[in-house]
Image: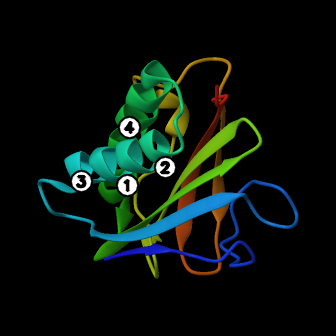
Amino acid sequence: MSTIVPRLFRVRVPGPEDGPDFREVRTLPAEAADTPATAALRTGVMYGLLCLPESDVERLAHVAGELAEHVAGCVLSETVLLVTDYHRGVATISVIAPAGRIWRALDPGSLAHVTSTDQIGVIPHDMGPSAYVQMKAARP
């Protein structure tokens, strides 16, 4: 299921106080073999529709797939929420495990496509644990 949500919809992820310009929230099964590929595909579609440079879209898609797999592997949860935001040159990918319990530490910095210029973090979200990666991605 995919939902483009109104700008004021609040999912607690790093970002501007009044919400991002663009946000998509997608529910994915945590333990499905194709979850990383689905996360990568949905992220690529969203950022591609925003006309970001192809190299940025490709890296964002890789990060989303890796982050979804990482959170699903570290948190006991039936589903994960993939939240993709874009606001004034900054793309944020968050994966939230609703009602999940951490059994292995979340470390988004360990992902292969995360670079030293990206901001990363873990948020003990009210809904469940979450991890995020934020990177610069300017629209032409």
- From the viewer's side, name the closer residue of 13 and 126: 13
- Closest to the camera, between mark 4 and mark 2, is 4
Q: Secondary structure at mark 1?
A: helix
Label 4 vs label 2: CA separation? Answer: 23 Å
- Closest to the camera, between mark 1 and mark 4, is 4
Give the image's coloring scheme.
Answer: rainbow
Q: Is residue 59 above or below residue 26?
A: above
- From the viewer's side, name the closer residue of 87 and 31: 87
Q: Which mark is residue 61?
A: 4
Label 2 near label 1: C-beta < 8 Å?
yes
Label 1 vs label 3: CA separation? Answer: 19 Å
Q: Which residue is mark 2?
A: 105
Report whether 104 appears left or right of 5: left
**What residue sits 48% from the left and 69% below the top?**
25
- Closest to the camera, between mark 3 and mark 2, is 3
The spot of residue 18 in percent (x, y) is 86, 67
Residue type marked 3:
Thr
**What residue sits 65% from the left and 80% below the top?**
126
Residue type marked 4:
Ala
